[in-house]
Image: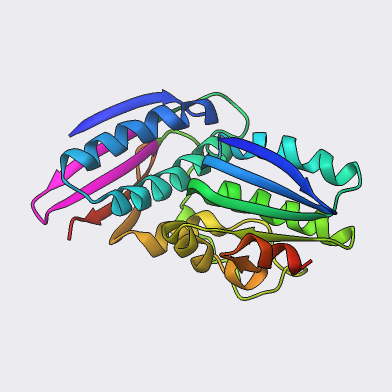
C-alpha cells in the first residue's frame, strides 16, 4: 500500500490524480480505464475539498491498494465531519435543461464507474473505498 | 486547459483543449461567462482537443448553457471524443446538448 497526504483543497487535485494515474499505469490498466479511475477519484476528492472540513483547513489522504483480482483500490481518507457520500440520491439525468439541477453528479459517477464502492467510519476518519478491476 | 475563441457571424466558436476538471473549470467559466454578459448568446464548443471532463466541469457547462438560453441563445457541441461522449451520455447531457461532427452543419443549426 502506498499513500499520499496533501491539504484538502482543489490546488492538491492534480498532484493526487497524477499519483493515482501512475499507480494504475503500473498495474497495466488501459488508458480509458485510467481515465475513469481519475474521474471517480476526482469526484471523491472534490467532495472532501468542498464539504469535508466545512470551510476549515484539513488534510486528505489517498491510499492505493493492490489486490490479486487483479484490482486497484483507491481509498480517500479525511478527518472531517462524519459523512457518507453514498447516502446521496442520484440526480435525475433524464430531465431537460430548464429543470436540470446543477449538482449530485459526482456520487452518481462514483457509483456507475467503480466495480465496488464502500464507505466506512474508522475513529475520526471518513474512508471511501473504490475498487477497479483490471479486466 | 486552454480556450480559443473566434467569431463566425453571430456564433462564438470556443475550442477547448486539455482537461476540464474541478481545478480548471473555474478558469473556463471566467473566460466564457463575460461573453454572455457582453451580449453573445450562441456558442459552438469545439471539444476535439478535450481529453478529460469531470462533474465539476459538467456543472459549469450546464450553468453556462442555462445562461445562454436565458438570453435566447444556445450552446452546441462539436467533435466530442468517444470517451468524453460516454461521460456526457452517462450524465444525460446528450439529451441536453446538440452534438455535431461537422462544423458547417453545427453553424447552420443556429
Q: Is residue A11 left or right of residue A95?
A: left
The colour scheme of the drawn protein is: rainbow
x, y percent for residue A83: 49, 48
* Quadrant of the rendering where the N terminus of chain A is positioned: top left
Could you tell me if residue A64 is visible in this image?
yes
Magenta residues (range)? A61-77
Vertical relation: A8 (above or below) A50: above
Vertical relation: A45 (above or below) B45: above
Q: Is residue A40 left or right of residue B77?
A: left
Looking at this view, is A78 or A17 the one in front? A17
Residue drawn 17% across the image and 61% down it: A135
Vertical relation: A78 (above or below) A43: above
Is residue A74 part of the magenta span, yes or no?
A: yes
Could you tell me if residue A120 is visible in this image?
no
Looking at this view, is A134 or B100 the one in front? B100
Q: Is residue A103 left or right of residue A125?
A: right
x, y percent for residue B69: 83, 62
Mainly helix, strand or loop, the magenta region? strand
Looking at this view, is A10 or B21 the one in front? B21
Is residue B93 part of the magenta span, yes or no?
A: no
Residue drawn 30% across the image and 37% down it: A20
Q: Is residue A29 left or right of residue B95?
A: left
Amino acid at each position: 500500500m502506498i499513500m499520499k497526504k496533501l491539504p484538502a483543497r482543489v490546488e492538491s487535485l492534480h498532484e493526487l490524480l497524477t499519483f493515482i494515474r501512475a499507480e494504475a499505469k503500473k498495474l497495466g490498466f488501459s488508458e480509458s480505464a485510467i481515465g475513469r479511475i481519475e474521474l471517480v477519484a476526482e469526484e471523491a476528492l472534490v467532495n472532501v475539498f468542498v464539504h469535508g472540513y466545512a470551510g476549515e483547513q484539513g488534510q486528505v489522504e489517498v491510499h492505493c491498494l493492490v489486490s490479486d483480482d487483479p484490482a486497484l483500490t483507491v481509498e480517500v481518507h479525511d478527518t472531517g465531519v462524519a459523512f457518507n457520500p453514498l447516502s446521496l440520491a442520484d440526480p435525475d439525468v433524464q430531465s431537460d435543461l430548464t429543470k436540470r439541477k446543477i449538482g449530485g453528479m459526482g456520487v452518481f459517477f462514483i457509483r456507475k464507474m467503480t466495480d465496488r464502492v464502500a464507505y466506512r467510519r474508522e475513529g475520526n476518519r471518513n474512508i471511501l473505498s473504490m475498487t477497479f478491476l483490471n479486466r | 486547459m486552454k480556450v480559443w475563441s473566434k467569431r463566425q457571424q453571430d456564433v462564438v466558436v470556443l475550442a477547448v483543449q486539455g482537461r476540464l476538471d474541478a481545478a480548471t473549470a473555474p478558469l473556463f467559466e471566467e473566460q466564457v461567462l463575460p461573453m454572455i454578459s457582453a451580449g453573445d448568446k450562441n456558442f459552438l464548443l469545439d471539444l476535439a482537443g478535450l481529453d478529460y471532463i469531470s462533474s465539476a466541469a459538467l456543472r459549469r457547462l450546464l450553468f453556462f448553457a442555462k445562461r445562454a438560453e436565458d438570453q435566447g441563445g444556445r450552446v452546441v457541441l462539436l467533435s466530442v471524443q468517444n470517451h468524453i461522449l460516454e461521460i456526457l451520455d452517462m450524465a444525460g447531457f446528450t439529451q441536453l446538448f446538440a452534438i455535431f461532427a461537422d462544423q458547417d452543419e453545427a453553424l447552420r443549426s443556429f
